[in-house]
Amino acid sequence: MEKPKKKQVLLFHCVEAEELARKVAAQSDLIQLQSINWRSFEDGFPNLFINNAQDIRGQHVAFLASFSSPAVIFEQLSVIYALPRLFTASFTLVLPFFPTGSFERMEEEGDVATAFTLARMLSSVPISRGGPTSLVVYDIHALQERFYFGDTLLPLFETGIPLLKQRLHQLPESDKIVVAFPDDGAWKRFHKLLDHFPMVVCTKVREGDKRIVRLKEGDCAGCHVVIVDDLVQSGGTLIECQKVLAAHGAAKVSAYVTHAVFPKRSWEQFVHKNDGVEKAFTYFWTTDSCPYTVKAIGNKAPFEVLSLAGSIADALQI
């Protein structure tokens, strides 16, 4: 069967995703960066202008978004809703981190599942001349969130795990790597993608008012253990897992999360200090799905950023 011809894509982006957008465009001559004037009126509401709007008629168009806070969602949605209406041949929305993904269920009457709210907002994106909008998201917290979206939007769930696997194979003594999951949810989400590595699984048990991390299954003695999860917030669970794994004989402990959210600069507790104290985490890998975090942790050990740029460039050709 003849391969479909690759398409030329015009890539727009929000302000904070500019660096990642440039990396995506550098992956292929078929991806051309476009610009938007991001301004505000005196009352604070957006004053936006899509440059060269007439030139995108009949073109394949994409927008790289970053919903880093509720404050920026409205202005980006305004552009996202406008682009498909400019007679584009197709429209792809790339939202590497779906920020409300971990708020996907109700535990008691009155809980608001904001993952569903954001999915409904994105499902209102107008269809383009080519049909429904394609939505590219990386390592969404729960795969069942696919069913939160309406029929006018096609979610494409990608993963950053191939970037981690590539990096792990570059390490010395890569045959001594064990993958650890901080809970059963992370195991369910990722174990099939990492099944050629030995695995250990941690679990949280309640003791009085505290939730204690314990080793549920697996052996990590003498190995380099890499904790894998979809995202990190405060980092408390990772730190507790590291202590448990070290107590069970792990020679080294590292971590990987696709989305390093780290509110209130919580990444600082992981930074290596020049005080002679043994470092808890040998490496801490993440992707560039959260641009503000990437800027904050740049050139600070143990952090290494694995860029999604190549994967996004490939997804734009689907």
Image: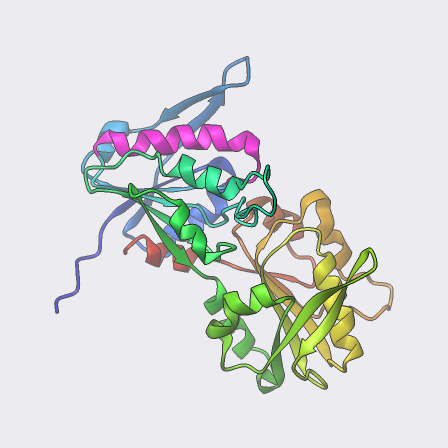
* Residue 262 point in image, percent of width and height: 66, 49
Question: In front here: 60 or 217?
Answer: 217
Residue 182 among magenta residues: no
Identified at 24% across, 48% down, the residue is 8
The quadrant the C terminus occupies is bottom left
In the displayed structure, does residue 31 sit left or right of residue 266? left
Question: In front here: 279 or 103?
Answer: 103
Residue 80 among magenta residues: yes
Identified at 87% across, 64% down, the residue is 275
Identified at 83% across, 63% down, the residue is 274
Q: Which residues are magenta?
A: 67-87
Question: In front here: 317 or 297?
Answer: 317
Q: Toward which corner of the image does residue 13 lie, by quadrant?
A: top left
Q: Toward which corner of the image does residue 158 lie, by quadrant?
A: bottom left
Q: Toward which corner of the image does residue 121 lie, by quadrant?
A: top left
In the displayed structure, does residue 263 sit left or right of residue 287? right
Residue furthest to the top in view is 42
* Residue 101 point in image, percent of width and height: 52, 48
* Residue 7 point in image, percent of width and height: 22, 51
The quadrant the N terminus occupies is bottom left
Question: In front here: 234 or 9?
Answer: 234
Identified at 60% across, 67% down, the residue is 184
In the displayed structure, does residue 318 sit left or right of residue 4? right
Q: Main secondary structure of the magenta part?
A: helix
Q: Is residue 40 above or below residue 290?
A: above
Q: Is residue 166 above or below residue 150?
A: below
